[in-house]
Image: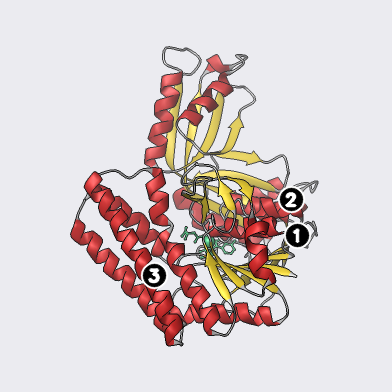
């Protein structure tokens, strides 16, 4: 039985926590299971790498880079001290960490001197978070008396395209690369978040992408189960940082989990479910700090519960584009032109609605001011001199709220009850969309209306 266990940044927040994770892994191994661990970077490390790479480019201050390097070295040294007891293993791991940090220093200095940060070099810099944490976790596992090696995503056989920052897998050679050590009783620790191109360049899957790495490893090796270990006891009925009285959802279908992740539940990277659903591999979300809790089990089973709506999610970093023009009526191809313009602006569209009068199209796109500016520029360029479009406006102070649950399918009156509750919260709905899967209803409201709207919806639907 092969189990892939992925641990997030907070689970390995310091050396003691890394040792705790190593114990969770080795305890599972003792149950006679083959374990593959996938790890994130230590908490906040990826954020700090994003910031320092930006500073290296903009400020070009070598002292700042030196300070950052000292801090990151100290943090990982401390982690090694607390995670590992045996001196020889400690020294082994330190050597690896020092080499990587020297390399990171050179790359950052290079960025500062050249004044250039390409998507490729940015991925390379961001990859250091996981490339520093994986050897420490692997060392802690060895310290507990088990064989372990660490591998980068590329070394573990996740081969991607060259779409830096949001790479797509083109080939999975995980079986060839990971099965041999696994069969020898070794516990491989694989860096999450990163893959490798055919030429051996490092790519990343986007922020939060370690969950996706675990799914790719699980699908590649045809694991019996993938477990995502995090800092909450499974998928909850809403974001616990915004809503009070949230509850654990014991079971969900793949489709529900996919919609939930796509519409903002940070606990799962949106692409995680797909590779597992294809191979029917169950996914469990577990709490590192409460390992006895069952967490959430995600399978093919579309079990109905008393709650028609299982969860309420939200996305904040979006903007709404409203396109208006009577010239759009009956003119074919306008929508195609709108979407190709947004494509050129790299706009990541999440919701679309068109009024039946065809005079108005509303589109929700991921991102902030910079992305909004790019979209407007391309749309204006596309329709310059054309009478089809009269007005294009953008509203950045909005968010998307989604109600998710397979029970909504075919159940009458849900939308009515939902919008009644939204009205009660005082929020003004600017756009509504329901996916054809009928597993979710999404709508757009003002940013300042989010908290009270989520709480009222949660109180109304989650029993
Ligand atoms: P990790 O570092 O383990 O990958 P993340 O911070 O990426 O963890 O995801 C876990 C966090 O997601 C939780 O701490 C919680 O605050 C947040 N979250 C948002 N929505 C949900 C939800 N519906 N269920 C569970 N957690 C959620
Ligand atoms: N370390 C990466 C990030 O912070 C990936 C992850 O944690 O999933 O985005
Ligand atoms: Mg995460």
Which residue is labeled 1 in the image?
299
Q: Is disc 2 surrounded by few (<14), some (14 to 19) or many (20+) residues within 10 Å?
A: few
Q: What is the x, y in percent for residue 29?
A: 67, 78
Q: What is the x, y in percent for residue 418?
A: 66, 50
Depth check, mark 1 against mark 2: the one in front is 2
The residue at 78%/63% (across/down) is 306
The answer to whether residue 288 of the structure is visible from this angle is yes
Q: Earlier in the sequence, mark 1 or mark 3?
A: 3
Depth check, mark 3 against mark 2: the one in front is 3
Label 2: element kind: helix
Which residue is labeled 2 in the image?
278
- On the rendered structure, is 456 left or right of 164? right
> Which of these two is toward me, 439 or 228?
228
Q: What is the x, y in percent for residue 222?
A: 73, 59
Q: Quadrant of the N terminus?
A: bottom right
The residue at 69%/72% (across/down) is 34
Q: Is disc 1 surrounded by few (<14), some (14 to 19) or many (20+) residues within 10 Å?
A: many
Query: Does the beta carbon of the residue at mark 2 sit less than 8 Å from ligand 2?
Result: no
The answer to whether residue 463 of the structure is visible from this angle is no
How far, Cα to Cα, is label 1 from label 2? Answer: 11 Å
In the image, residue 306 above or below residue 424: below
Mark on residue 97? 3
How far, Cα to Cα, is label 1 from label 3? Answer: 38 Å
The image quarter in which residue 356 lies: top right
How far, Cα to Cα, is label 3 from label 2? Answer: 37 Å
């Amino acid at each position: 039985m092969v189990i892939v266990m992925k641990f997030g940044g907070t689970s390995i927040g310091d050396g003691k926590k890394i040792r705790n994770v190593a114990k969770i892994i080795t305890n599972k191994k003792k149950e006679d299971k083959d374990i593959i661990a996938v790890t994130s970077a230590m908490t906040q490390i990826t954020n700090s790498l994003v910031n320092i790479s930006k500073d290296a480019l903009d400020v070009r201050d070598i002292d700042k880079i030196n300070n950052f390097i000292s801090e990151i070295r100290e943090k990982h040294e401390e982690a090694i001290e607390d995670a590992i007891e045996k001196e020889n293993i400690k020294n082994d791991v330190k050597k690896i960490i020092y080499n990587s940090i020297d390399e990171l220093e050179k790359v950052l200095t290079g960025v500062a001197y050249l004044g250039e940060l390409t998507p490729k070099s940015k991925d390379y810099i961001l990859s250091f978070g996981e490339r520093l944490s994986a050897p420490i976790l692997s060392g802690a596992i060895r310290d507990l008396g088990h064989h372990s090696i660490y591998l980068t995503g590329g070394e573990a056989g996740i081969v991607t395209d060259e779409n830096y920052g949001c790479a797509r897998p083109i080939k999975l050679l995980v079986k060839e690369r990971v099965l041999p050590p696994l069969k020898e009783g070794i516990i491989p620790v694989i860096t999450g978040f990163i893959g490798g191109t055919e030429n051996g360049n490092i790519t990343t899957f986007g922020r939060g992408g370690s969950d996706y790495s675990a799914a790719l490893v699980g699908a590649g090796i045809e694991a019996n189960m993938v477990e995502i270990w995090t800092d909450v006891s499974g998928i909850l009925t809403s974001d616990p940082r915004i809503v009070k009285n949230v509850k654990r959802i014991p079971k969900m279908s793949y489709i529900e989990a996919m919609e939930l992740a796509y519409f903002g539940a940070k606990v799962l990277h949106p692409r995680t479910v797909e590779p597992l659903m294809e191979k029917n591999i169950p996914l469990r979300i577990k709490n590192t700090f409460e390992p006895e809790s069952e967490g959430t089990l995600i399978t093919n089973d579309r079990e109905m519960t008393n709650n028609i709506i299982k969860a309420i999610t939200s996305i904040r970093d979006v903007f709404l584009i409203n396109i208006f023009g009577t010239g759009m009526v009956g003119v074919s191809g306008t929508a195609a032109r709108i979407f190709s313009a947004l494509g050129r602006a790299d706009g990541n569209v999440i919701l679309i609605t068109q009024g039946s009068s065809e005079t108005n199209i509303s589109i929700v796109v991921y991102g902030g001011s910079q992305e909004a500016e790019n979209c407007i520029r391309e749309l204006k360029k596309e329709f310059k001199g054309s009478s089809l479009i009269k007005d294009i406006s953008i509203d950045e102070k909005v968010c998307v709220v989604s109600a998710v649950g397979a029970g909504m399918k075919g159940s009458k009156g849900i939308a009515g009850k939902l919008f009644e509750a939204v009205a009660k919260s005082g929020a003004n709905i600017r756009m509504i969309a329901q996916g054809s899967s009928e597993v979710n209803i999404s709508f757009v409201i003002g940013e300042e209306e989010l908290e009270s709207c989520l709480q009222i919806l949660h109180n109304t639907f989650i029993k």
